[in-house]
């Protein structure tokens, strides 16, 4: 159980999100943005987020960059990446660290 990679369960986790609203209304099922590390950089995850209309900030892995460059014009454009937004990810990582301690 503990050996399973997080990204293999990504779609299940995204499908089970339910954030209660302040006041009346159904709970939200779509986050404003997903910010993740390179471990979540895959075509499948990016396609899942695009289908649901969720903006994301996920850096590309080096092997993906090189593969795209080796394919030349057929490799496509690099995915968008916002460095400013990604810098805020450390807040969540520090929170996890405190919870584990």
Image: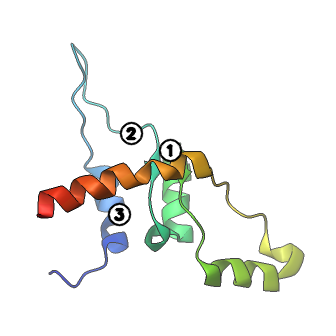
Task: Tell whether label 2 touches label 3 (CB within 8 Å).
Answer: no
**Disc marking residue 39:** none
Instruction: Give the alpha-carbon distance from disc 2 to disc 1, as whole Å.
Output: 7 Å
Image height check: is 19 above or below 92?
A: above
Image height check: is 44 above or below 51?
A: below
**100, 27: nearer the viewer:** 100
Circle 2 residue = 30
Q: Quadrant of residue 2?
A: bottom left
Of the image marks 3 and 1, the number of the one nearer the N terminus:
3
* Image quarter of the N terminus: bottom left
**Disc marking residue 54:** 1
Q: Residue at x 45, y 68 (%)?
A: 40
Q: How many marks?
A: 3
Q: Residue at x 63, y 80 (%)?
A: 62
> On the picture, is 11 further left or further right than 99?
right
Circle 3 residue = 10
Of the image marks 3 and 2, the number of the one nearer the N terminus:
3
Instruction: Give the alpha-carbon distance from disc 3 to disc 2, as whole Å.
Output: 14 Å
**66, 53: nearer the viewer:** 66
Task: Tell whether label 1 touches label 3 (CB within 8 Å).
Answer: no
Q: Residue at x 78, y 63 (%)?
A: 77
Task: Tell whether label 1 touches label 2 (CB within 8 Å).
Answer: yes
**71, 81: nearer the viewer:** 81
Residue 14 is situated, as x and y percent measured from the top left of the image, at 34, 53
* Image quarter of the C terminus: bottom left
């Amino acid at each position: 159980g503990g050996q399973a990679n997080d990204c293999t369960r990504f779609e299940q986790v995204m499908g089970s999100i339910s954030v209660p609203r302040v006041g009346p209304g159904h709970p939200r099922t779509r986050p404003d943005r997903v910010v993740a590390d390179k471990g979540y950089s895959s075509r499948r995850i990016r396609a899942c987020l695009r289908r649901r209309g969720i903006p994301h900030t996920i850096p590309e892995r080096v092997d993906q960059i090189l593969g795209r460059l080796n394919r030349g014009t057929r490799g496509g454009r690099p995915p968008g990446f916002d460095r400013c937004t990604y810098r805020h990810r450390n807040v969540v990582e520090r929170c996890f660290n405190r919870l584990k301690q």
